[in-house]
Image (cartoon, rainbow, N blue to C red):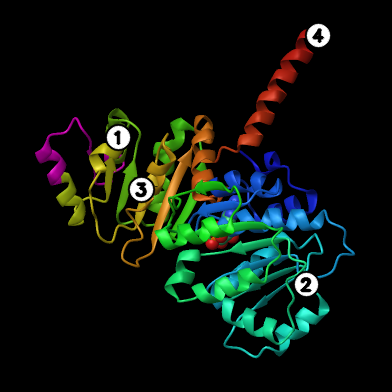
Amino acid sequence: MSFTSLKLIDPVMEALTAEGYIYPTPIQIQAIPHVLSGRDLQGCAQTGTGKTAAFAIPIIQLLHKQNKAKTGIKALVLTPTRELAIQIGESFATYGKFTGIRYTTVYGGVSQLPQTKALKRGVDVLVATPGRLLDLINQGYIRLNQLEIFVLDEADRMLDMGFINDIRKVIRLLPDRRQTLFFSATMPNEIQKLASDLLKNPVKVEVTPPASTVDSIEQSIYHTSKPDKPKMLLHLLREQNISTALVFTRTKHGADKVVKFLHRADVKAAAIHGNKSQNARQSALNDFKRGRLKVLVATDIAARGIDIDELSHVFNYDLPNVPETYVHRIGRTGRAGLNGTAIAFCDADERKELRDIEKLILKRIPVVENHPYACNPVAQLKKVIKSRDHRYRRQFN
Ligand code: AMP
């Protein structure tokens, strides 16, 4: 599913495109339509799931559609820490940059002067930590009587940090007629009770954290053709002077073929897969660990549980059908704080697998275009069209 199906307005879509977002995360898919329709929401989700955008995007859209002459704070996001408040404020700035929505952030531990100045200029969205919010309310800088949307973020952490009374004080100041969005990573009884007090007929959404790829792993993708993959691998092993590489193929037969090709080029390599005896597998693994082999070619099942310290490179020689497998494969490198490199080959039949992987890891894998076995999908298509066009002309002219 793309962001287009969520019926977002152009200024928001433009901001998301500028940010490089391609696909909404599961919590965004589940939450955004309901928030846009005005429903209360109970979201069980951790940071890292895209939950900030799941509430910030529809809030921006709802406020953008309103009469601009209305003044006063229309949305309040309450969050436990200063770091989170800053991050959420940045999200509103990013997603709302083409809408003219005004936001500000207030939190303790710093001078209140810049915050009160911003409040006096007028804000639509206020992101706040509980203590400073109550302080500024008591001093008369903040009034919440125009509020339409209230977001309680990280409710369980609020409770842990002893903010429950502050939260209850804030809630008493909110208009009864409002939309409430409630987020918590866990839902112990006390939090469920708070949610039940706050929410009216809420939609409930729950997501687990996505499979993630570690930042210390440098990922890249090489578009190439199936027959060129062995040469591509050899080229990179030589060009980048790679000392240890774990290479994943889809089939046992494919693994054997790669090893044969590498042997012919004098590269020390072995395959481990289900057709090899336990002894053969173990000795290949030992040789690899001791540096007697440069390349170990494996299928996923055979490689399960293999733990190799200081593995510098992982190759997705074939892209896996199950996108989570990609994350597991590349997680073999970049361990214990070391840097790792994950290189993937993608042939014309594997584009769907690549899209699914990028959807899962929420980022585009950088494409390396300048290499001797490049196969540019667009150029290839043009070539086919051109040759067809040529044949057509010959036939009819
Ligand atoms: P959060 O769970 O709100 O802390 O978000 C985690 C990270 O994911 C943030 O760095 C966001 O910028 C990023 N993010 C959120 N939604 C998307 C998306 N649809 N595509 C790509 N990145 C996203």
Which residues make up the magenta segment?
263-283
Mark 3 or 4: the one toward you = 3
For the residues bearing labels 4 and 1, Cβ distance under 8 angstroms: no
Query: Does ligand 1 reach within 8 Å of label 4's beta carbon?
Result: no
Mark 3 or 1: the one toward you = 3
Please report whichever mark, 2 or 4, sits nearer to the chain's N-terminal start: 2
| Element carrying mark 3 | helix
Residue bearing mark 3? 328
Q: Nearer the viewer, residue 353 or 224?
A: 353
Query: Does ligand 1 reach within 8 Å of label 3's beta carbon?
Result: no
Distance from disc 1 to disc 2, alpha carbons, whole Å, reads: 61 Å
Ligand 1 shows up in which quadrant of the image? Answer: bottom right
Please report whichever mark, 3 or 4, sits nearer to the chain's N-terminal start: 3
Please report whichever mark, 2 or 3, sits nearer to the chain's N-terminal start: 2
Q: Amino acid at mark 3?
A: His
Residue bearing mark 4? 396
Residue bearing mark 2? 123
Residue 296 appears left or right of 187: left
Q: Amino acid at mark 2?
A: Val
Residue at point 41%, 52% (across, down): 342
